[in-house]
Image (cartoon, rainbow, N blue to C red):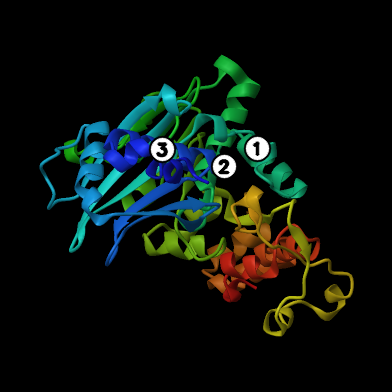
């Protein structure tokens, strides 16, 4: 039973719910389950509390609707927000709480027609590792990534949907560089927002209200003599142009960009008016990322995937496949999954690929050039995880779309 339910059923709660205590237990349950977010949302007849476990929302508890205003007020106090403002969105940050194991919270309040929706992003230092070796990369991708981040210059791009582990991968890369070079290397970041404080790294946070934008921060940063620059996200042509130029002029630059595939990054940048010859010269590699839920080791058992899914698996692979799926147990909160690991696709930019970029080849043709020169696709790597029983075939198809096969 969760701490929240235990409290709600206690004698003290029957006499009257103490909101500060209730919020504390909600946070405790989320931290104990290793959730990344808490969603508190007014539904038709209840106040639904859900937590995001391994990337998927799971119901935790349903509360009376009349508690919404008090719970919202409590979170506003924690984040130093305007408590009487209910018709406009608000965002804030609650500092580390020793009672909850030192977690920090990013709190977002959003007005809806039924009342305010509260989303709390949890940053748990005890549940966050910046060790590249623990991210779940295949050995060959890990070696390729290490090779890229130890180059003296070039632009490394990471792509994938929100919550696919891009920021964690970049933080891990910076942490690795700090461990290897110590105080002899100058590393700077521009982020929105800064999610974790890294040792010996100069981290800056974008502030649009004061016109401290990505381009403005990067232009200033170039005069700070950095060797490694991490840009939170390339969102506009100006940021893209500065990042590309920095990669060409002796800096190692890492950033993220939204694209449907690793090869699609180049078309996205060309649409931002970056010349193909600049891309061919500056981009040294693109890492595509997704996060897969791992089967719970306590309840995983053999199973047969649906015929429609099985048709996507090559016939020769099916014969030796060891498909497994978690049935759900107390250890995994009846989800069948426990933890996540990365599945990745590494596009190393070599001379044939540069030539294809210079020829403005379409995305599908660029993808084929990369595959012809040794790139294993994300689907191939994900399928290997399902065939060996690490995760389910359905999970692979949930995370990797069919057009990426």
Q: Nearer the viewer, mark 1 or mark 3?
A: 3
Q: Position of residue 306 (x, y in %)?
A: 70, 80
Quadrant in the picture for the C terminus: bottom right
Residue 142 seen in the current view: yes
Tell how many labels.
3
User: Would you say 217 lies left or right of 391 here?
Assistant: left
Instruction: Check contact, mark 2 vs mark 1: CB within 8 A.
Output: yes
Residue 214 visible in the shown view:
no
Circle 3 sits on which residue? Answer: 25
| Mark 2 crowd level (few <14, some 14–19, many ≥20, 10 Å Cα) | many
Q: Look at mark 2 in the image and give the residue it sits on.
A: 169
Tell me, yes or no, whether the two marked residues, 1 and 3, touch with CB atoms within 8 Å: no
Helix or strand or loop: what does disc 2 sit on?
Answer: helix
Indicate which disc, 1 or 3, sits on the residue closer to the N terminus: 3
Q: Tag 1: Cα neighbours inside 10 Å, few (<14), some, or many (≥20)?
A: many
Residue 179, given in percent of the width and then of the height, sits at 63, 22
Residue 186 is situated, as x and y percent measured from the top left of the image, at 49, 22
The quadrant in which residue 113 appears is: bottom left
| Residue located at (65% from left, 59% from top) | 328
Q: Which of the two labelled residues, at mark 2 and mark 1, occupies the earlier sequence position?
A: 1
Find disc 1 in the rendering and name its residue. Answer: 132
Secondary structure under badge 3? helix
Quarter location, residue 132: top right
Q: Please report the residue visible at 53 percent of the width from the left and 35 percent of the height from the top.
A: 171
């Amino acid at each position: 039973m969760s701490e929240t339910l235990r409290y709600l059923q206690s004698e003290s709660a029957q006499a009257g719910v103490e909101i500060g205590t209730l919020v504390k237990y909600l946070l405790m349950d989320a931290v104990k389950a290793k959730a990344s977010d808490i969603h508190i949302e007014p539904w038709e007849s209840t106040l639904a509390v859900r937590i995001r476990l391994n990337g998927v929302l799971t119901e935790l508890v349903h509360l009376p609707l009349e508690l919404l205003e008090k719970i919202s007020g409590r979170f506003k106090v924690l984040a130093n927000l305007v408590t009487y403002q209910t018709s406009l969105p608000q965002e804030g940050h609650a500092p580390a709480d020793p009672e909850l194991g030192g977690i920090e919270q990013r709190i977002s309040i959003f007005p809806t027609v039924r009342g305010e929706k509260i989303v709390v992003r949890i940053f748990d230092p005890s549940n966050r590792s910046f060790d590249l070796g623990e991210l779940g990369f295949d050995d060959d991708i890990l070696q390729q990534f290490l090779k890229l981040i130890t180059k003296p210059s070039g632009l490394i791009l990471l792509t994938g949907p929100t919550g696919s582990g891009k920021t964690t991968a970049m933080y891990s890369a910076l942490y690795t560089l700090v461990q290897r070079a110590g105080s002899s290397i100058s590393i700077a970041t521009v982020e929105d927002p800064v999610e974790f404080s890294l040792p010996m790294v100069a981290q800056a946070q974008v502030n649009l209200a004061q016109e401290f934008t990505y381009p403005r921060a990067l232009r200033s940063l170039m005069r700070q003599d950095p060797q490694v620059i991490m840009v939170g996200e390339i969102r506009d042509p100006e940021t893209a142009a500065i990042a590309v130029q920095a990669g060409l002029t002796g800096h190692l630059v890492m950033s993220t960009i939204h694209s449907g595939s690793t090869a699609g990054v180049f078309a996205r940048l060309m649409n931002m008016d970056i010349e193909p010859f600049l891309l061919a010269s500056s981009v040294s590699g693109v890492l595509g990322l997704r996060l897969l839920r791992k089967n719970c080791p306590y309840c995983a058992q053999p199973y047969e995937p649906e015929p429609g899914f099985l048709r996507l698996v090559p016939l020769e692979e099916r014969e030796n496949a060891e498909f497994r799926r978690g049935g759900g147990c107390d250890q995994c909160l009846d989800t069948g999954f426990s933890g996540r690991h990365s599945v990745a696709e590494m596009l190393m930019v070599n001379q044939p690929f540069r030539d294809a970029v210079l020829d403005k080849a379409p995305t599908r043709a660029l993808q084929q050039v990369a595959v012809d020169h040794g790139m294993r696709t994300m689907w191939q790597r994900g399928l290997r995880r399902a065939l060996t029983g690490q995760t389910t075939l359905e999970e692979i198809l949930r995370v990797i779309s069919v057009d990426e096969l």
